Image (spheres, helix red, strand yellow):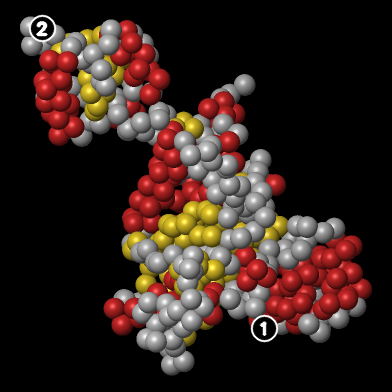
Amino acid sequence: MSKPTPLSGYPEFLPAERAVEREVVSRISRTFELHGFANIETRAVEPLDRLAKGGEVDKEIYVLRRLHADPDDTAAGDSGQSRQLGLHFDLTVPFARYVLENAGHLEFPFRRFQIQPAWRGERPQEGRYRQFNQADIDIVGRDELPFHHDVEVVRVMVEALDGLPLPALSFQVNNRKLIQGFYRGLGVPDVPAAIRAIDKLDKQPADAVAALLVETAGATPEQADTCLALASIRVADTSFVETVRGLGVEDELLETGLAELAAVVDGCADVVNDHVTVEANLRIARGLDYYTGTVVEIFMTGYERLKSVGGGGRYDALASDGRTTYPGVGISFGVSRTLVPLVADGVLAGSRAVSSAVLVALADEEARPAAHELADRLRRRGIPTEVAASPQRFGKQIRYAERRGIPFVWFQQEDGTHQVKDIRSGDQVDADPESWNPPATDLHQTIVSPVINSLEQPS
């Protein structure tokens, strides 16, 4: 077999790097579960007619078929109807379908978290991959969903990400009712076009966006300037309410949006800190039309080039069967989008490449059964342990453990006693297999953050 050629856009981690991803997923999962979110996993494929809705993302959908499939083949389980299948490009579309299919078995409001891969056939670049993992939390109601859940999902995601050794994060929040009501009260003819234009402020200069507001939304130059004035407001408290009112625009929907956004900012005041902040940013729009209220974008300090590393918001029609509507609110965190650049830059690393905390040394091949029995005793007490691959000189076995990142080597003495060596410090002490424990920090693989830790040291 010839040497394989790497595929761009499909990131893979080495073992120590994978330990970082596993630990991140484990920590955020624990936080979600502490708040009562149930974990689900949906299938990788959906019918193409459910995925493709005529938007830009349609160009990025991967279609799934057998290599020698007949074009008229019927997808399994489609009751005789021929349907093309595609890989899901996010977790929201399959979740909406999951809610509709299982509504009779779910208790509403339904609180779910989901951590799975998704696929998009876009141009690979840093932070954008063709296969990537993301973590979503959502709360879904039946026909109605009280607003306090908007505050809750932001708080939960703040808490989840605050527990990770990431660079500082900023949750920037806005409200679609606020901006829609503002544009409507201002008299802008095409409100959706105005939202799409403002959403381009992170890619185009203000004068270009002003021209776009005039050209596509029918705004006057004065109205365009006022729209840009709204978009320039960004504060970490509720002072934005009076600032917006000072622009002289009145509308009932605007007032509702101001109240909801103020509630989110106020509701998160006791969970933010220097590591994770929540700010009202009135330029955030999230171009997707299904958002109807709260909108959120998450940015990471020092990695602004990635744009947002997460986002979400309120959607009052996640799914509908024609009789019942299921409104929801949720936030997605880009696990791969965040971790791949951080690992590549050396900001995050795994403490070791393997799970083993102990290597049991072999004096000779005859000692292997006793070594395995000892390893089993340690494993039964929850200590990850492996036995040396071969009875080389002890110095070579210690170097083998060092290369694999295993911190302790265990020696069985001829008189039946035991000793364990910390190969980092060189300390070797007597040990009892039934009572010895490694330090808690060495028991399992974990994340080390040399760059972040050095930045946090006082000068």
Circle on res. 252: 1
Q: Is residue 457 visible?
A: yes
Q: Are marks 1 and 2 in contact (CB under 8 Å)?
A: no
Which secondary structure, mark 2?
A: loop
Which one is earlier in the sequence, the residue at label 1 or at label 2?
1
Residue that extends furthest to the bottom in the rendered view of this protein: 323
Residue at image point 58% right, 36% down:
344
Image quadrant where residue 437 sits: top left
Residue that extends furthest to the left in the rendered view of this protein: 415
Image quadrant where residue 413 sits: top left
Q: Position of residue 102 (x, y in %)?
A: 34, 78
Which secondary structure, mark 1?
A: helix
Q: Is residue 419 above or below residue 113?
A: above
Q: Nearer the viewer, residue 439 or 61?
A: 61
Q: Is residue 456 visible?
A: no
Q: Is residue 137 above or below residue 26?
A: below
Q: Position of residue 106 (x, y in %)?
A: 31, 76
| Identity, as a three-letter code, of the amino acid under mark 2 | Glu
Residue under circle 2? 414
Left or right placement of residue 319 versus residue 243 in this view: left
